[in-house]
Image: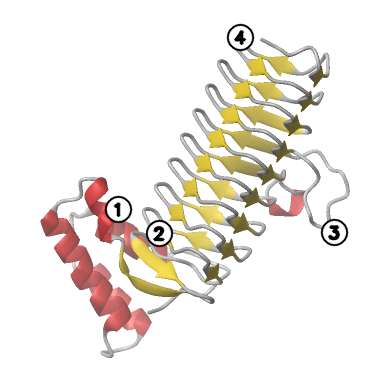
């Protein structure tokens, strides 16, 4: 059902069973999957691909030019996955040529009121942004992350799988997987044990992960790189530990949040 007050470009691709509410505006290069619902006063413009069963609430703006002075109108895109909920006043900007050309939101994500996703951000599945979370450009967020309300994440930062960001935090460094971080210029606050339990990680694995975390981030023995190398030399079959070690060893433009 499309409300008669909605303005939809004739070249936009609207799939079946899509509901478009009053005063929505949909641009030429927009593709909307099946069973989506745009509530009212939603603007979707530019090269935007929205997956099936996604809901977009009133006054959201998706696809407007990125807030990057280097952007000169080049054709870039936004990809939004399936079954997402994008609440009121959210803004999502497309990618830039210098940043890979795409901004991506995964499946089953919840963007609460006022969330801002800047250009070239890559967001994986099952991510929750509480009210007025803000991402600068080029942020990479892995799956099952929760970002607290009124938090700000610095450009080029990585947020590891299963981590949790406390409300009103300023994230200026990478947050390793399965950890919690909070504060103005946030610090690590241990493991996200609640998240691990919710994802049915065993008590044994959590215990072993805690030992690794405490040794890497809490020990005074050797240097940080030497501690990491020592732990990596010990073979482990635990997914969480391997994920943590791979993340810390990966390439980054930022330092790490530390305890």
At label 4, counting other C-alpha atoms closer than 10 Å, the crowd grade (few under 14, some 14-19, many 20 or more) is: few
Q: Position of residue 207 (x, y in %)?
A: 15, 64
Q: Classify residue 19 as left or right of residue 112.
A: right
Mark linked to residue 151: none
Q: Say above or below: 98 vs 207.
A: above
Q: Position of residue 252 (x, y in %)?
A: 53, 66
Residue that label 2 marks = 164
Element carrying mark 3: loop
Question: Are the residues at dot 3 and dot 2 in contact (C-beta closer than 8 Å)?
Answer: no
In the figure, residue 227 lies in which quadrant? bottom left
Closer to the N terminus: mark 3 or mark 2? 3
Question: Which label lies toward us, 3 or 4?
Answer: 4
**Foreground pick, 6 / 170:** 6
Residue that label 1 marks = 195
Q: Residue at x 75, y 49 (%)?
A: 96
Residue situated furthest right in the rendering:
72
Q: Say above or below: 118 vs 187.
A: above
Question: Are the residues at dot 2 and dot 1 in contact (C-beta closer than 8 Å)?
Answer: yes
Distance of label 1 from label 3 (alpha carbons):
38 Å
The quarter of the image holding the C terminus is bottom left
Distance of label 2 from label 1 (alpha carbons):
8 Å
Mark linked to residue 16: 4
Question: Are the residues at dot 1 and dot 3 in contact (C-beta closer than 8 Å)?
Answer: no
Distance of label 3 from label 4 (alpha carbons):
38 Å
Q: Classify residue 59 as left or right of residue 123.
A: right
Residue that label 3 marks = 69
**Foreground pick, 127 / 75:** 127
Question: Are the residues at dot 3 and dot 4 in contact (C-beta closer than 8 Å)?
Answer: no
The quarter of the image holding the N terminus is top right
Element carrying mark 4: loop
Element carrying mark 1: helix
């Amino acid at each position: 059902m499309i409300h008669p007050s909605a303005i939809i470009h004739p070249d936009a691709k609207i799939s079946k069973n899509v509901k478009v509410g009053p005063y929505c505006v949909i641009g030429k290069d927009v593709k909307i999957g099946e069973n989506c619902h745009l509530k009212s006063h939603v603007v979707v413009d530019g090269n935007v691909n929205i997956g099936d069963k996604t809901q977009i609430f009133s006054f959201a703006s998706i696809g407007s030019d990125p807030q990057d002075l280097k952007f000169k109108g080049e054709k870039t895109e936004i990809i939004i996955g399936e079954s997402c909920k994008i609440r009121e006043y959210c803004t999502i900007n497309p990618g830039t040529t210098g940043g890979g050309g795409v901004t991506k939101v995964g499946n089953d994500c919840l963007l609460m009121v006022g969330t801002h996703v800047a250009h070239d951000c890559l967001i994986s599945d099952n991510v929750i942004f509480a009210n007025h979370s803000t991402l600068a450009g080029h942020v990479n967020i892995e799956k099952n992350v929760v970002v607290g309300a009124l938090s700000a994440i610095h450009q080029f930062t990585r947020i590891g799988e299963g981590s949790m960001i406390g409300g009103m935090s300023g994230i200026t460094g990478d947050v390793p997987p399965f950890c919690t971080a909070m504060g103005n210029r946030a610090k690590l606050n241990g493991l996200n044990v609640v998240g691990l339990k919710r994802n049915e990680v065993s008590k044994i694995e959590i215990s072993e992960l805690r030992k690794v975390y405490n040794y890497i981030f809490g020990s005074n023995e050797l240097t940080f790189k030497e501690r990491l190398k020592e732990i990596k030399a010990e073979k482990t079959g635990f997914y969480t530990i391997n994920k943590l070690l791979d993340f810390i060893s990966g390439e980054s433009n930022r330092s790490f949040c530390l305890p």
